[in-house]
Amino acid sequence: MNKKHKIIVAVTGASGAIYAKVLFDKLLQLNNQIEKIGVLMSKNAKFVWEQELGNSDYKNYPFTFYDKMDFMAPFASGSANYGTMIICPSSMGTMGRIASGVSDDLTTRAADVILKERRKLIIVARETPLSLIHINNMKLITEAGGIICPATPSFYSNPNTFEELVSTVIDRVLTLAGLEYNSYSWNE
């Protein structure tokens, strides 16, 4: 049997709370492949979730939630061996702080740790249009080993609901994270 995954999920205040919800739901389905999930949710992320989804159901997920300034969280150090960090959705501000090496909260510290340890950082960037600053930050993160996976849904699976549409992005994120997940594949 493969080693189980230890995953950090950060949810920022970018619009697109449905991406975080679908990610949380799918991670629950894959619990047999996961050892631990640590979640960071900013106050803005909680506000956006409540505004966009009309509920505070993020409180009902059985994950361990950490405060944004909890530098005693295990994944604030590389020795905890968390292999993957998913920032979903990611604001451009969070991405900019990561790109410039500013570790001023647990999200940016955890991303810094993931990059320095040469592990998987997957950023689901949610913004449009992009400025040259955004593009350059994406370039820097990519050069440092991170993966930018824009919240850009695909349509070739003929999604019928918002959740199915969002799943076209989240399924890619799960695959990038190394989780085995049965989802739509082109021409299969």
Image: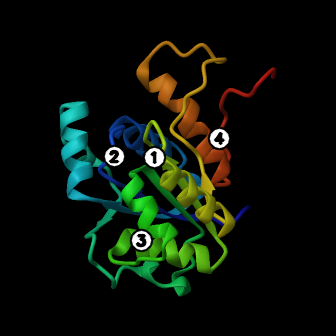
Q: Residue at x 59, y 73 (%)?
A: 115
Residue 92 showing in the rendered view: yes
Structural crowding at the residue carrying mark 4, measured as other residues with C-alpha within 10 Å and reported as few (<14), some (14–19) or many (≥20): some
**Which mark, residue 108?**
3
Mark 3 vs mark 2, CA separation in Å: 15 Å
Q: State the residue in front, 64 or 128.
A: 128
Of marks 3 and 2, which one's residue comes earlier in the chain? 2
- In the displayed structure image, the side of residue 30 where residue 145 appears, left or right: right
Q: Which mark is residue 181?
A: 4
Of marks 4 and 3, which one's residue comes earlier in the chain? 3
Residue 47 place in picture, x, y as percent = 18, 46
Taking the spot 49% from the left edge, 55% from the top edge, the residue there is 133
Q: Is residue 179 visible?
A: no
Seen at 25% across and 41% down, the residue is: 49
Q: Which residue is mark 2?
A: 14
Classify 157 as above or below 4: above
Give the residue displayed 43% in from the left and 37% down from the top: 22
Mark 4 vs 3: CB contact within 8 A: no
Q: In which image quadrant can residue 39 be found?
A: bottom left
Which quarter of the image is occupied by the N terminus?
bottom right
